[in-house]
Amino acid sequence: PTVSAERAPPPGTLPDMLRLAPDWLDDGDLPLADVAAYADLAAATRTRGTPRPIALSDPALPEWESGLETLALPPALATRGLDPVWEATYGFTLLQVDQVLTVGQAPDYATILRGDFDPLAMRDAWVRGGYQAVETEGVTVWSLFPGDTIDLSAPASRPALGSLNNVVFLDEQTLVGAPKLSILSAVLRVVHDSAPSLAEQPEVAALLAPAAVVESYVTAMLLKGRFFLATPQDAATPIAAIPPVALALVGLLPPGHDTGSLLEGTPAAVATPGPNLSPRMVTLLTFADADAATSAVSLIQRRLAAGTSEVTGQPHTTRVQPVRVRVIDDEPTVLVEFGLRWGEADWRRILDERDLGAMMWAEPDPAGD
């Protein structure tokens, strides 16, 4: 099943949030490999069975907060979003956020939040903090420093490290923030259908093709293919045969879910959780064409089964349990599913350490060696 114009993705899912994000992939504004990061706090809370705190004084807060390390949250929101100073400054806390998508790279990035917000309380906080109402793209937005100056001199700028210097409500549940007014304007052009969204970019659309899987992500990162480009230190791994990866989506499924049950259902189907499943990290890789994707499958399977990690010095299977490597029908996309033997938070460490040798590719040797 694919994400298409005929069926809108469920609100707050990764594909839905990407429909609000500008397509900056091809304009040279993203020098680093990371393109976007997504976290679904509501789903994470629901699937863990832990109560969601209703206030910063709630006794359930420490247990709930301990689960946040698994999620790809914006650093300022993760570390300061439960601080009373944050609430006084912006009129909401992390407890009210259901989903968050960050897209772009500093200083050109946007933060898109969905949640149970109180717009009146938030606007009151913005006015107290020195925000000004200004017009852009025919919409009233709130800005600490109208224009593209990134200034942290205002007290209201500091808790979010400038990421909420310019803010606008798309509706009562959706807030967008950005360091620059021009970035906020770019999001509004997408919302008004006068600019393409990131979800419409062809390689991103190919990654979103297995709709039931990507709509189930609790957290995920969208990465340029060069994130999987081998470094000289990886030379001991037989990497050259895997075709170049164009783009990748890496994320975590809810506890007890796997891609087999999701792919067998309809796009709206909810898998029946299995009680004994290890946490599942699912990577989707796009290639130049279907032939390249098909050739990558067998190579990745062999490396997972018999290869050794350049990071740990141990077989790949010590850290991950290979579950499924397959081509997504009619797409140049490969799905790689692992069970995480070291716990669900290890998916972030695997990315941070680039312990991805089974999926690494290398530039062709110009000497032909």
Image: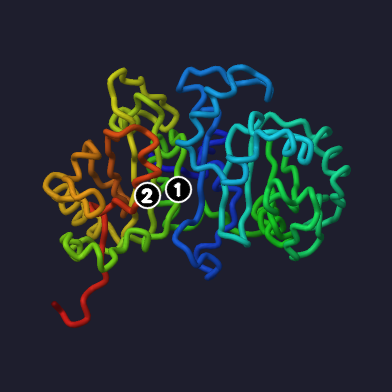
In the visual, does 348 lie left or right of 240?
right
In this rendering, the answer to whether 313 lies above or below 361 is above
Foreground residue, 205 or 305? Answer: 305
Q: Residue furthest bottom?
A: 367
Per the model, the C-alpha gap separating discs 2 and 1 is: 10 Å
Please, what is the three-letter code of the amino acid marked with disc 1?
Answer: Met
* Residue at the (64%, 34%) spot, across then down: 94
In this rendering, the answer to whether 228 lies above or below 71 is below
Residue carrying label 1: 221
* Residue at the (25%, 65%) spot, across then down: 233
* Residue at the (43%, 33%) spot, across then down: 216
Residue 48 sits in quarter:
top left
Whether label 2 touches label 1, CB < 8 Å? yes
Q: Residue 266: give x, y in percent of width and height.
A: 39, 30
Query: Within 10 Å of the Cα at label 2, are there few (<14), some (14-19), or many (20+) other Cα atoms?
Result: some
The colour style of the image is rainbow
As helix, strand or loop, the secondary structure at mark 1 comes to strand
Q: What is the total number of numbered labels drawn onto the structure image? A: 2
Please, what is the three-letter code of the amino acid marked with disc 2?
Answer: Leu
Residue 95: mark in rendering: none
Q: Residue 161: give x, y in percent of width and height.
A: 67, 52
Residue 351: mark in rendering: 2
Q: N-terminal of the two: label 2 or label 1?
A: 1
Mark 2 or mark 1, whichever is nearer to me: 2
Q: Residue 119: give x, y in percent of width and height.
A: 79, 35
Point out the image quarter for the N terminus: top left
In the visual, does 311 lie left or right of 368?
right
Point out the image quarter for the C terminus: bottom left
Residue 244 sits in quarter:
bottom left
